[in-house]
Image (cartoon, coloured by chain):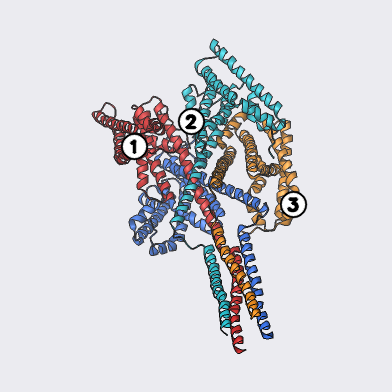
Chain colours: A blue, B red, C cyan, D orange
Amino acid sequence: MEPVAEPRLEAWERRTDYPLTVLAVLYLGVYAVQVLATRPGQAWWWWLDAALWAVWVVFVVDYGVRVGLARRKGRFIIRHPLDLLVVAAPFFRFLRLLRLVAAISVLGRVLRDDFRGRVGSYLIVSVSLLSFVAALGVFEAERDAPDASILTFGDALWWVLTTITTVGYGDLSPVTTEGRLVAAGLMLAGIAVLGTVTAAIATWFLEQVGARDASEAVAAPPRADPADLRHAELLAELRDLRRRLDVLENAPGEAESTRARS
Amino acid sequence: MEPVAEPRLEAWERRTDYPLTVLAVLYLGVYAVQVLATRPGQAWWWWLDAALWAVWVVFVVDYGVRVGLARRKGRFIIRHPLDLLVVAAPFFRFLRLLRLVAAISVLGRVLRDDFRGRVGSYLIVSVSLLSFVAALGVFEAERDAPDASILTFGDALWWVLTTITTVGYGDLSPVTTEGRLVAAGLMLAGIAVLGTVTAAIATWFLEQVGARDASEAVAAPPRADPADLRHAELLAELRDLRRRLDVLENAPGEAESTRARS
Amino acid sequence: MEPVAEPRLEAWERRTDYPLTVLAVLYLGVYAVQVLATRPGQAWWWWLDAALWAVWVVFVVDYGVRVGLARRKGRFIIRHPLDLLVVAAPFFRFLRLLRLVAAISVLGRVLRDDFRGRVGSYLIVSVSLLSFVAALGVFEAERDAPDASILTFGDALWWVLTTITTVGYGDLSPVTTEGRLVAAGLMLAGIAVLGTVTAAIATWFLEQVGARDASEAVAAPPRADPADLRHAELLAELRDLRRRLDVLENAPGEAESTRARS
Amino acid sequence: MEPVAEPRLEAWERRTDYPLTVLAVLYLGVYAVQVLATRPGQAWWWWLDAALWAVWVVFVVDYGVRVGLARRKGRFIIRHPLDLLVVAAPFFRFLRLLRLVAAISVLGRVLRDDFRGRVGSYLIVSVSLLSFVAALGVFEAERDAPDASILTFGDALWWVLTTITTVGYGDLSPVTTEGRLVAAGLMLAGIAVLGTVTAAIATWFLEQVGARDASEAVAAPPRADPADLRHAELLAELRDLRRRLDVLENAPGEAESTRARS
């Protein structure tokens, strides 16, 4: 699958990347305020909800433009399932926060640029953001559900922690469909986190071991390089030839002088 | 254990691989319909059950033929425990779906062919298939059991998710023997999934780090290659020799002229 | 910490390794029969218990001899904590099965000898053995405890599975001290199993990726080796010199002839 | 982010490292005695509490001095969040034990110095210490809480084990905020432990596989080094030239003799 040049699409994404990220962060803020500070039915709740719908419309427009600009539209849609999900599931308001994945990548870009440092930064930023978002989502989904166990935002944060680390006490667990969708995302994220941490440590180990071997190699007595030995042999041959030629060059000269004497 | 050539067995497996895979997929479909849409005792249920038994007979015949074609029959049986399980445990209808492992490998074969892409495709396809199959199996096993906690197919899917990610809330867990067999398979699969994800990330990391080192090496000022230095030295020697020989060749000519003059 | 030669100790261990392993396997058999088929107070139970104590005495004697043969006794004791545990905790009959760790290594030795195969065999053999032993231990510890949840051997096996895979539903969990010691061992083993599986997959991945790169390297058009280029240059120089010398050698001959004509 | 030289800060830390570590160990001892042997309201409890506060004051002074000595104070504070936590949260007495992280590093320093050995030692020492400290912290936080499940120190140790291995039965789980903070630290530690164990095993595997390949390479028949072949060719050329020159050198001599005869 050779990459296809999508100049116009990429230009659009370059231009809209930051504003949309800012918008997504605002969305998160408004969403958090709505979930934590207001309740459905209050006047404020309606205003905030309207704002969230407005942001969603912007996301839909952005998605439409990108599909329109893409040369291979089918491929674009297949390659961007999260964006499709954001647009296609308007009533899972929680899902719109998927747009924050872009925010994470932007944050990652402005962070320190050595590989390990970037991995660490990504991990911390994305796990924190994901945990907060998931806690909001599960709290909103569960708090009014019958026989739910996650009733406060503190419970939601605690449940997120036990889930993303795959500990899973089960003292709290979601009972609604939306809450379980959040859980599904969290568990997959948890596996990715475990894998990333392990991989980072393993990479570091291998470098350590490699470094140690290297230092041992340095410590070892420097054995002669075969290439140098071969070189010395050729050089000796050539120097010998030169010596012979020195003699040879003077020989004819003598011959002249002897002939001159006769 | 050097591999043994099994030409006839391999020929048979090449010929029957696709049809049996299609059959296994059909089996899954019929099984799903029977489990989700009908109940024991209904007329439909009996028809579907007959179809499932028919497929099982085909599997038994296939297994028998393969044992018959294998040169080292004992080794074949030991090396294909899953197939034996399918044939030997006719009343664990669920187990027949193990034949789908072949379906996965076929699917894997038709998928993109770079290593990482193939691993990813295998992982997604097999985990999705496994989860669906396990949910069907545990749902069928548990739904009518006394004091079971998995009562709907949604519960079954949720339980599969918590199990394969090794989160294991325990809000739902199987109580029947067949349900626990399904769980055992899922947990082992979960470990394999965790391991594969981690390994994939670690491989990617190591390549990144390697690439970074490489780029640094490129960035570094190109220090002289000792081989080039040795080469230059030899070449200088040879060029010197040639110069001397040029002189030498003309010398005898002079000698002629001088002799001519005398 | 340079290794210390312990010729007499090693000789003893070589001689006693197999018999003690057989004894440990017998111990497991007797222990299993006692736990699963008899109950304290029955005549049979006492006979089996006497046999178990007899085996323990043998282990104590073996340990004493090994300490006696070891040159650096303190170091030996520190390096063999499991053996010390077996000897020092006579009333945790379960712990004596730690001696089976030796059995596993012996089994491993007789198994196929390529690295990956050996790792796989170790893993399967030791995990199966460990699970069975742990199930016996926790079953014996829990079955008569007040408000215990593990009441049948089937429960014990199921609990072992949920624990060693770190899923940990918590539908069953030990409540006695001895049961929790068993659990501690299982959980640590579970981490080791997860780690080993992941490591094996990662190693395989890295080899795959390496192999792929290698094959690509082969596929790539063979670019000229700088060493060959340098070599060709030197050779050209030398061949030129030879040509010149051919001319030079014939020149004096001519000179003779000319002189002869004068 | 190039490291900044902090000579005075480092000098201070070198000087205070050991004493503060000893102090932290003492703190742990006093804290353990207070939690396990006394109850709030008893005279002893007050004396021990005073001692703990005194140690905390020392930590605060040390932190203040280090901030004062640091050239880039903001960076120092950002880079030492744990120390800040110790100082800023005086009423989470548990958190002061974070200072023991230094103790672990000191212990690590005095331990065996090959890489793998050090990793293993760190792992064992830090996991044991962490588990004990976490058990103390969660026990103190939970034991008097309404509807808490962790009521004895044994329960606390068992809960720590199920949490750090990410098994998470959920038969016991903290309900207080401080208990859940302890749990958060433990779960993150658990992920790190899993990752470290896996990474260590993977590193060992890769070395095994590498070693095996190396030994195979040694076993393989030594194929001719192209460099040697090239070298031999050049040498043959040069030896040929020398032979020619030998002839050439004697030729003029003959010429003389012939001339002398005429």
Q: Mark 3 and mark 2, same subunit?
A: no
Picture coordinates of residue C218 (x, y %)? 45, 55
Dot 1 corresponds to which residue? B9
**Are the residues at dot 2 and dot 1 in contact (C-beta closer than 8 Å)?**
no
Q: Amino acid at mark 2?
A: Leu
Side of B65 relative to C216 (left or right): left
Q: Amino acid at mark 3?
A: Trp
Dot 3 corresponds to which residue? D12
SS for dot 2 = helix
Q: Nearer the viewer, residue C215 or B112?
A: C215
Q: Residues within 10 Å of mark 3 (few under 14, many from 20)?
A: some
Q: How far is the residue under mark 3 from the one under mark 2?
A: 52 Å
Picture coordinates of residue B106 (x, y %)? 35, 43
Q: Nearer the viewer, mark 3 or mark 1?
A: 1
Q: Is residue B195 above or below residue C156?
A: below
Q: How far is the residue under mark 3 from the one under mark 1?
A: 76 Å
Picture coordinates of residue B116 (x, y %)? 44, 49
Q: Nearer the viewer, mark 3 or mark 2?
A: 2
